Amino acid sequence: MREYPKTQMMTEVQIRNTSEQTRLRLLEAAREVFSQHGFQGATVREICRRAEANGAAVNYHFGSKDGLLAEALNFAPLKAMQNANINAGECPRMRLRLFILDLMLMLLDEKNPSSQCQIMARELADPTPALDKIVREAIKPLHDYLGKLVREIADEKTGEAELRRCVHSILGQCLFYRHSQPVLQRLHPRLRYSHKEIEAIAEHIAAFSLAGIKHLGTNLA
Amino acid sequence: MREYPKTQMMTEVQIRNTSEQTRLRLLEAAREVFSQHGFQGATVREICRRAEANGAAVNYHFGSKDGLLAEALNFAPLKAMQNANINAGECPRMRLRLFILDLMLMLLDEKNPSSQCQIMARELADPTPALDKIVREAIKPLHDYLGKLVREIADEKTGEAELRRCVHSILGQCLFYRHSQPVLQRLHPRLRYSHKEIEAIAEHIAAFSLAGIKHLGTNLA
DNA sequence: TTTACTTTCAAACAGGCGTTTGATACGCTC
DNA sequence: GAGCGTATCAAACGCCTGTTTGAAAGTAAA
């Protein structure tokens, strides 16, 4: 996986106690800063400052800012969520509800250590070299899984394009609350994303979407 | 409105023939570059290059890059769309359909000279000093108008919060296609946003949303 | 023509960026 | 202790950014 630095002479113990610790601190700081400012807006110096590491540490341990982003990405939480959803055993409509709730919690919960989704959500709009990997390993599986879920709920005759658009409608509603947060903050200054508020939003999106999916063919030709 | 430069001695004719022309060229170039690269990604030098103006022209005519953005914004197309929608005379459901179609055309049509919406859509995610003005003059009226429209369609007993979430659901679906364009391009490389495709997407969002609004209270407590 | 003023221009400026460098301290093996 | 590979550090590098500067060009009134 990683190539910097090539460990040759040090013992594993030493590595774990010295190098590996700053590596981890850098990764954690990077996730914070990337999720807050985006890739362009984040600076290597600020990441190093938060990690209490030297300014050259990023390039030493990860080769470049790009390399740091690539290793800071972690798709495990998203995959875990999908697996949990598959094994929930509920009916498809209930699984969609759970899916949306879990996704909204990842996107909005401030206390959630999974800033992964926030980093990825930022990447959607303006691409970095890491976007290809993100799409391949996280977004495509997400679309695929959601597509299957919608197919189970929708009418059998529903076409492929229409199915895809339903997936877009669901994800669009969810991502809106993250992408437009600066705007929503100005429109409704009092609004806070408490766990209760997130649940209410998720429930709305689920109900709204289920109605939309169910009545696909009834509104027009 | 503008303060740079303070016109004192030149005749109006001269101003129109010299200064005003480069001003307009700068504004047009700025709209192009801002909509393509976002505010952070856009560089003053590139804007000046496209406008065939000197590198100092932006600061001379607009004071700063921020000032250029503020004057490059033009909310007229968005307001015109809303006015046209009010006067369409159709029933609320049909007006919502028209509204979504017009918005999607503004957001996606490549040939459309109104890159205004694209600039604004970019600003949603990461704020610049111009965001306050954008929210006040464009986004808030948009939310308000859409809110009234939804209120006409929805059940009378629908609460304020739920109404607002419907507006978010509609806008979220629309904006998704713009915000996630880099991702969608990778997921479906063949997809092109022809006028026909945009119409199909708009029609889907309208039908999906109308079903969602109509069946607000039926799915759960 | 002289004067006043606006606009354009090449050049430079100051600051921030990601990155590189060479020295230094450290821990291990021999 | 000698030698070696590793990690950290302050400092600097080269580049790009928005912005400023002072001179030059141009036009219109005096």
Image (spheres, coloured by chain):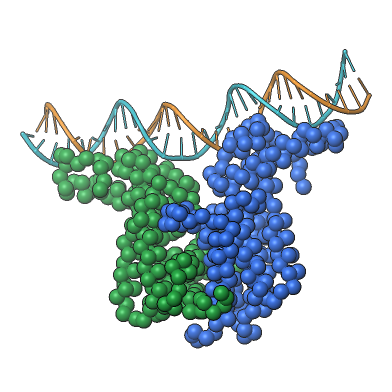
Chain colours: A green, B blue, C cyan, D orange
> At 54% from the left edge and 65% from the top edge, which residue is drawn?
B201
- Identify which residue, B18 or B195, lies in the foreground: B195
On the image, the x and y values in percent for residue A10 come to 16, 42
On the image, the x and y values in percent for residue B42 come to 56, 42
- Residue A56's place in the image compared with B160, above or below, is above
Residue A40 located left or right of residue B195: left
Tally of marks: 0
- Identify which residue, A6 or A164, lies in the foreground: A164
> At 46% from the left edge and 57% from the top edge, which residue is drawn?
B184
Q: Is residue B190 visible?
A: yes
- Residue A188's place in the image compared with A39, above or below, is below
On the image, the x and y values in percent for residue A136 come to 36, 56
Residue B42 located left or right of residue D22: left
Q: Is residue A208 visible?
A: no
On the image, the x and y values in percent for residue A17 come to 22, 49
Which picture quadrant has residue D2? top left
Which picture quadrant has residue A115? bottom left
> At 21% from the left edge and 49% from the top edge, which residue is drawn?
A16
- Considering the image in quadrants, where does the C terminus of chain A appear? bottom right
Residue A151 located left or right of residue B220: left
Which picture quadrant has residue A66? top left
Residue A45 located left or right of residue B62: left
> At 68% from the left edge and 59% from the top edge, which residue is drawn?
B78
